[in-house]
Image (tube, grey):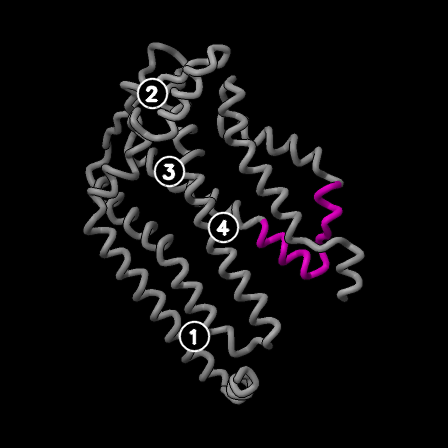
Amino acid sequence: MSTQRLQQQEEMTFWGHLDVLRKVLFKIITVVILFTVIFFIFMPTIFDKVILAPCRGDFWLYQFFQDVTSSFPFLPQFIADGYEVHLINIQLASQLFVHMSSSFWLALVFSFPIILYFIWGFIRPALYENEIRGVRKAFVFGSVMFFIGIAIGYLLIFPITLRFLADYQLSALIPNQVSLDSYMDTFLMMIFILGIVFEMPLLAWALGAAGILYRGFFSRYRKHAIVVLLIAAAVITPTSDPFTLAIVFLPLYMLYELSALFVKPQKEAEEAA
């Protein structure tokens, strides 16, 4: 079956490829628009229940930190009860634009597996059977890791960052007033960055398959990586609380070790070549 598809692909003209690509892009745009409309309709509820949830003290992470720190007196006490971040809108059209942009970005995230499926359908006829298995696994794994990164960004990294920045004061004479635009820019940026960062194992696998990266790299530079990841965790959570620092550092370090598992040792890679 794959041989017939390959022959058809070879016989297809440039304009034939372009026509197939046009149809794929049309399907992708249609799906994104459909998801955007759906999210636009339900966005007020999503905003109150999900996006603004880290602004309230009953958010699960704050309650978890409060329970843990109250159980260990030597840790700085984390207070969640009564905590709230109030957002303000200072631009006339901001609420409308945020409504539209949030609907689009959420649509892009949740339609991501469908988009990959359409892309996969476009490139599959040009691949050999052994390549099909490898690329299929890469697509599935990449999608799963992307959503894990999104989840960790929303459930862990963003709430910690929000809590610190919203409470930080250069002077007691300067009260913090968090604007809607500032909140959403930070929210979307941090969550998407974590989604992309969690593609690190997939990138390591690709570089390993190309013979650029070997497993020895990860063991050789492990100490350096620990220092860099600790600095990154400290930047994300610039507090003196070692518990919070560890909560952020551990997922990043586990991601580093997971990436190493997807890369073959140098001898093994040379034998396969």
Where in the figure is residue 221, as x and y percent of width and height? 72, 39
Give neighbour class at mark 4: few <14, some 14-19, many 20+ (Cα, 10 Å). Answer: many
Q: Main secondary structure of the magenta part?
A: helix
Residue 4's tag is none
Mark 2 to mark 1: distance in Å?
Answer: 51 Å
Contact flag, marks 3 and 2 (Cβ < 8 Å): no
Q: Which residue is mark 4?
A: 145
Mark 1 to mark 3: distance in Å?
Answer: 33 Å
Where in the figure is residue 142, as x and y percent of width and height? 51, 55
Q: Secondary structure at mark 2?
A: loop
Give neighbour class at mark 2: few <14, some 14-19, many 20+ (Cα, 10 Å). Answer: some
At 54% from the left and 62% from the top, the residue drawn is 137
Q: Which residues are magenta?
A: 201-219
Q: Which residue is mark 1?
A: 21
At 60% from the left and 71% from the top, the residue drawn is 131
Q: Secondary structure at mark 3?
A: helix
Number of the front mark, 3 or 2: 2
* Amino acid tagged 2: Ala
